[in-house]
Amino acid sequence: MSGTSLPLSIRTNGDDIEIVNQLLLPHVVEFLQINTIEDAHDAIKTMKHIHTQIRGAPAIASLAALALASSLSRALTASPALPFLSSPEALEAHVKPQLDFLFTARPTAVNLGAATRRLARVLAQGVQAQTDARSLAAALVAEGRAVADEDVGRNREMAKHGADWLVRRTEAAGEDASALNVMTVCNTGSLATSGYGTALGLITRLLETGKLGKAYYTQTAPYHQGSRLTAFELQALKAPSVMICDTMVGSLFQHHKLHAVVVGADRIAKNGDTANKIGTYNAAVLAARHKIPFIVVAPVSTVDLDIPDGSHIPIEQRPWIEACLVRGAVYDGEAKATKSEQAVVMLTPPGLDASGVYNPGFDVTPAELISAIVTERGVAVGGEDGKIDLSAVV
Ligand SMILES: CSC[C@@H](O)[C@@H](O)C(=O)COP(=O)(O)O
């Protein structure tokens, strides 16, 4: 593959689903078939040296919804007719455990739960209305596909809202907004979504409108979503960009002009507290210290109005070994790492175990450190009191 061709995280052809194996990116582009609900669950959850094959809050929700849609769509054409299509109750008994199973794949990103709950609602309404089982299965297929299809459009909406707001805010501060330098964390582009991206969507929008100065991004240890995936995406977009190690955020803010930090989210509580990839909180504290606007970009499905604040967000603890390993292509000595030869390398001395390693996948940034939360419905701006009212954007 060429170093600049950007794969989608999920591609479908009728009932066939393939995902790009993110474990091997950016050096190898390999697609994996997702044939069953178990395949989808495994791709979202399983640690296969290191991390998962598909990741990013909106992308895992899309995959779960598409997997259910494909399995029901195949069932509708099966001959002889499958017993669970005999009544709405039989369909419910078949589908409900599958939704519950998909929901358990990863805990922090609420989008997965929002997708499975959305499908469960269609199911429950159909059972209550005694909809014919085949029609109900068809409605679930349509709803599952809609979860994935809606993602790209809403990403473009939020990117536009966020970019316009940043330009206006910069100009209102009496600064030049013609070349905005922004920093991001983790990976929030098309590999983390069904396309275009959330925070990286905002950066893409600045690029498309000629307003991007430079996009800085952290490596995002230990899985390196930044150096492996965001680097790959920014290269494909031909965006002026600079990678920094996670330890360099403070130095970057001290020595370079930054107009904003822009991040995605895995779950936003009712009061605006935001869980995102580990390291986001560090960046927010430093951004506040340097008076740099800190912007969260995420779809409405990432907002969890059922929890009052961030202390209720379940934080995924990743396997300890992932923090000790690094995966990539073998270096050829000339900054052209060979593409075919991959290796998983251990960074730590023998003898470490779970008791000696701290490895949370996410941290929570308190609302008081957030300047604006952007969804497809608009921008909620943080007040002087450190609070953010999300009611107009959910
Ligand atoms: C667009 S999803 C939010 C991201 O900023 C990020 O936290 C994320 O990609 C989720 O982490 P991951 O563990 O890679 O699935």
Image (cartoon, grey):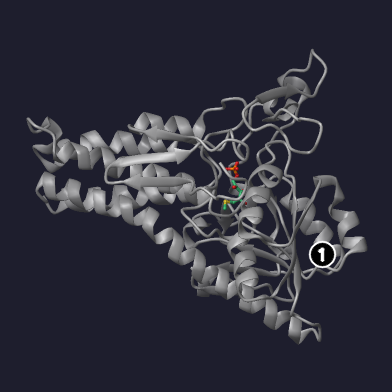
Please say if 360 is above or below 112. Answer: above
Q: Give the amino acid at mark 1.
A: Ala
Answer with left or right where residue 301 lies relative to residue 352: left
Q: Quadrant of the N terminus?
A: top right
Residue in the picture at 73% in, 73% down: 385
Residue 145 placement (x, y as % from top left): 32, 52
Where residue 217 sits in the image (x, y, percent)? 74, 54
Residue at left 80%, top 13%?
A: 350
Quadrant in the picture for residue 78: top left
Residue 234 lies, in percent from the top left, at: 65, 56
In terms of secondary structure, where does tag 1 sit? helix
Most foreground residue, 59 or 392: 59
Q: Circle 1 sits on which residue?
A: 288
Q: Nearer the viewer, residue 290 or 340?
A: 340
- Is 94 left, or right, of 86 in this rendering? right
Q: Note whether residue 36 is visible.
A: yes
Q: Is residue 388 visible?
A: no
**Around disc 1, counting alpha carbons within 10 Å, would you say few (fewer than 14), some (14 to 19), or many (20 or more)?**
some
The residue sitting at 51% across, 36% down in the picture is: 21
Q: Residue furthest top?
A: 351
Q: Is residue 243 left or right of residue 275?
A: right
Residue 311 placed where, x, y %?
Answer: 64, 49
* Nearer to me, 28 or 292: 28
